[in-house]
Image: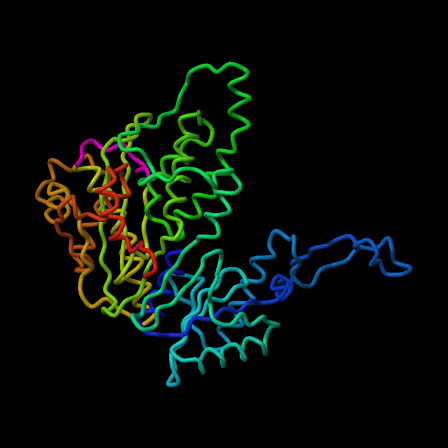
Amino acid sequence: METFRAVAHVAAVNGWVLHQVDIKTAFLRGELEPGEEVYMKQPKGFEAKGQEECIWELQKGLYGLPQAGRIWNKAMNQGMLSLGFTRIKCEYCLYFRQTEAGTLLTGIHVDDFFLAASCLVQADNFKQQLASIWEISDLGEATFCIGIAIERDLVNRHIYLSQTALIDKILTAFNMVDCNPVSTPMESGLVLTRHTDTLTRQEELDLQDLPYRRLVGLLMYLAIATRPDIAFTICKLSQFMNYYRIIHWNAAKRVVRYLKGTRTLRLRLGGKNPTKLVGFCDASYACCPDSGKSIGAYCFSLGDGVISWASRKQKTVAQSTCDAEYIACSEAARECMWLRMLTSEINLPQPHPTPLLTDNAAALALAKDPRFHARAKHINTRWHYIRECIDNSDIYISYVNTSDNVADILTKPLPSPAFLRLRSFLGLCDLP
């Protein structure tokens, strides 16, 4: 998803065309490697006359084979390389080609090509080249890709990503079309825990009938694709797939009520400013009452709107707020370095250290200066990766006030005024 949003952002900033192409029966296009033997029974109604008891030896990929996706991926990669594309080393689903005629960038999701071209001629030539190798469906200008609606504002060089159709589907599927909207996805101060109390047989049956897993699964796609404002809530709800109670179900329904009132929100990317990577990171210390672990979060922007975000429970128990924030900085640094590699390989290098902003002065000092060894020797060495990034001038870490830390919305349930303010910084807005 980060790659998809990065391609959309680059296309919007540069005013490039965005098109879609689908490969017909893609899994039938790749050939099995020599020595790879796969056999199958003859399909009913298609048996060879006089050889009904024989079986087939496959020579090509087939839908239903465990390795079918991999076979197609190899064939697709060979085809793209033959057309002069370079596969991005840090992101194997992204291909880049730059010639005197222009630039073309395409992201591939199985058999769907999401291509950004510097001119329409480049896009048309690429489609003709694809058609010479495989049978394709030219879907024209990209308006709906992998469940995400795409709208363009060519004058202001903005692109809007939304999933209104999925929100409406959720409202209908869970009989909440007429529910009352709320202003935040999670009630401020709400603490969700694993309940170990013994349930009666009737209570167990009632809980089994609740489609909690299905609802959280649907909401999860919204949280990772276009709605960072619900990322923290979904991070919390997904921790109780096997331990949910009525309180968790009500919390999940509150997210749906929030989406009902914000179904028209879109993630705005692009803009006329230069493509510059900026990141925020934050942590909520020991906020999990079951494990004592903290929630770490980060978000990164290339201009207007965020292209990458995460809200996750940290893998280790932090000893202090400083430790939790420091771990969050380190995890953000890894994402930052990946984004720097990605932009560099598509010929949009970041010439200066990337600003990474945190609201914890102690973590900031610990990252910048190793002289605090006595206070940090208990921290696992892998979390000191942030220091290496700073020493190499890849990242510049600095302080930001908590009220202005965009990542704060990804670590805790906030009161409505603070939530709405930070939500606007994520790039979520209604179309004018």
Residue 219 location, quadrant? top left
**Quadrant in the picture for residue 22:** bottom right
Badge count: 0
Quadrant in the picture for residue 4: bottom left
Please identify the quadrant where the N terminus is shown.
bottom left
Judge whether residue 381 can be spotted in this image. no
Colour scheme of the picture: rainbow
Q: How far from the left and from the top, in percent, is residue 361?
A: 11, 43
What is the span of residues highlighted in magenta in the rendered image? Answer: 312-321
53 shown above or below 351: above
Q: Nearer the viewer, residue 37 or 67?
A: 67
Question: Does 287 sit above or below residue 13?
Answer: above
Q: Is residue 328 magenta?
A: no
Q: Position of residue 91 (x, y in %)?
A: 40, 61
Outermost residue to the right? 50
Picture coordinates of residue 47 (x, y %)?
A: 84, 58
Tell me: 81 left or right of 373: right
Which residue reaches farthest left?
371
Residue, x 27% and y 67% (percent of image)?
271
Residue plotted at (45% across, 83% down) = 121
| Quarter of the image that includes the C terminus | bottom left
**Helix, strand or loop: magenta stretch:** loop
> Is the residue 135 above or below the residue 65 in the image?
below
Q: Give the x, y percent position of residue 129.
A: 53, 79
x 40%, y 64%: residue: 151
Q: Is residue 185 visible?
A: yes
Single out the residue that lies furthest toward the bottom. Answer: 100
Name the residue nearer the viewer: 332 or 166.
166
